[in-house]
Image (tube, helix red, strand yellow):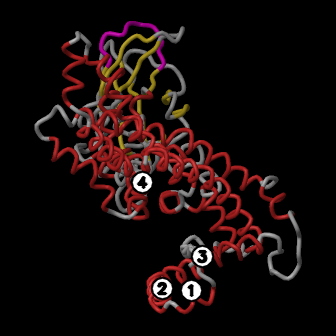
Amino acid sequence: MTDSSITAEPPNQGAPPTADEAGADPGRRRRFLVALGFLAPALVFLGVWIVYPTVYTVVRSFYDRSGDAFVGLDNYGTLFTTDILLTAIRNNAIWVLVVPAVVTAIGLVFGVLTERIRWSVAFKTAVFMPMAISMFAAGVIWHIMYTQDPSQGTINAAVRVVSDAVNPPGVLSGAAPSGDDLRGSAAQGYRLQGELKAGEVAHLGLTRIPASEVKDGVQAVVPATVEGGITGVVWRDFKPGGGGTAGEVEDGEVGIPGVTLRLTDASGAEVATATSGADGVFTFPDVGDASYRLGIASETFRESYGGVSWLGPRLITPAIIIAYIWVWAGFAMVVIAAGLAAIPRDVLEAARTDGATEWQVFRRVTAPLLAPVLSVVFITMIINVLKVFDIVLSVAPPSVQDDANVIALAMWRTSFGGVNDFGLGSAIAVFLFLLVIPVLLLNVRRFRREA
């Protein structure tokens, strides 16, 4: 009998299944179809609303206004040679340099301060409140606040209160002489032609004075001469109902109270001042025998504060930036405050125990631990200001939109704002997309590194 050995070889477990075997697995196919069913709506939405418009915009940027003729890179050349578009690029650069840093700094300050006050919840709610309204609505609010007329614009109304307290407006801000005997200007004051001596009476008629500005005045009278002095009358040289003779005090014409008058000598030096009464009469007693010149002081005609032209071409971009910071400061504060709350308190207490001052604790401990949160706020703001649009459109009047222009607004105005140049508008959109991509990639890389 002979011995024989039988060796059993294990099956090849490492070999992948064939395509037929994989397709024959009903469980795997079912799982694939279920996954595809869940992903299909998102994929369709992504393709229809993201991928297709992006590809079409890139392709459209190489065609002319009508989309019929291929123009190559001409639209991109126009982008960097047109003054309006260059202004948009310059303004966007200003936005990127200013807004992210300021918003992050304000959010940091507010976040630190709210940790030390009792009414922090109320303060955070008030600061965060602008985020609850749309950016367009916020722009409308600030447009009204920036109105130059202090009777309408809140900001100029507040400034006028301070300005008028320092430099009170005159009693006759819009008055003018009624005759040729008064010469000068409202800025320099008006001077009576000819010289006066003791015993003479001066007639100073003014017009273009609303009745509301002389409501405290009474019937003007021509004063009697004053021995050794000079007297006169300042009155509203306008007779109700019309008629009358210019330069003569008549019935119904009221005196102007509160007018400052100055008497100067031959050298121009001021000798005396006087203020008119309710009937417009004033007197310079005991002036001597010399000859004098009489004038109405310029402060009598000083106008009330007229307001800053916040919506003018020079200030429109800073004005919109202030409004934008007002909206986004609450976002930065809430995010940074959340980061502060996550910092271990024992680390801060250990630094204080070691003798560190509050500034050293903030600079050496708090700020480094907050660096990831600060970078989130900063990068988010860069992305937002690169595509800022609605608040610029709602704050800036049409007359200064060229001066306030930004890239996103230029894209909209070129494509849909009346120009209807979809080729150039697409080129602007592609340029904006290329500006945003590096920031997005930086943000994604940071998230992956932290994960």
Residue at point 21%, 37% (across, down): 114
Please say if the residues under marks 3 and 2 sit with CB atoms less than 8 Å apart: no
Of callouts 3 and 2, the N-terminal one: 3
* Residue that carries the numbered disc 2 in the rendered image: 28
How far is the residue under mark 2 from the one under mark 1?
A: 8 Å
Q: Which of marks 4 and 2 is in front?
A: 2
Q: Residues within 10 Å of mark 2 (few under 14, many from 20)?
A: few
Q: Nearer the viewer, mark 3 or mark 2?
A: 3
- Give the secondary structure at mark 4: loop
Of callouts 4 and 2, the N-terminal one: 2
Q: Which of marks 3 and 1 is in front?
A: 3
- Give the secondary structure at mark 1: helix
How far is the residue under mark 3 from the one under mark 4?
A: 115 Å
At label 1, the amino acid type is Ala
- Give the secondary structure at mark 2: helix
Q: Residues within 10 Å of mark 4 (few under 14, many from 20)?
A: some
* Magenta stretch holds residue 289: yes
Of callouts 3 and 1, the N-terminal one: 3
Q: Residues within 10 Å of mark 1 (few under 14, many from 20)?
A: few
Question: Taken as a whole, is the magenta stretch helix, strand or loop?
Answer: loop
Residue at point 51%, 43% (across, down): 318
Q: What stretch is highlighted in magenta?
A: 284-293
Residue at point 79%, 55% (across, down): 82
Residue at point 56%, 73% (across, down): 5
At label 4, the amino acid type is Gly
How far is the residue under mark 3 from the one under mark 2?
A: 15 Å
Residue 358's spot in the image, x, y percent?
Answer: 25, 18
405 or 230, which is in the foreground? 405
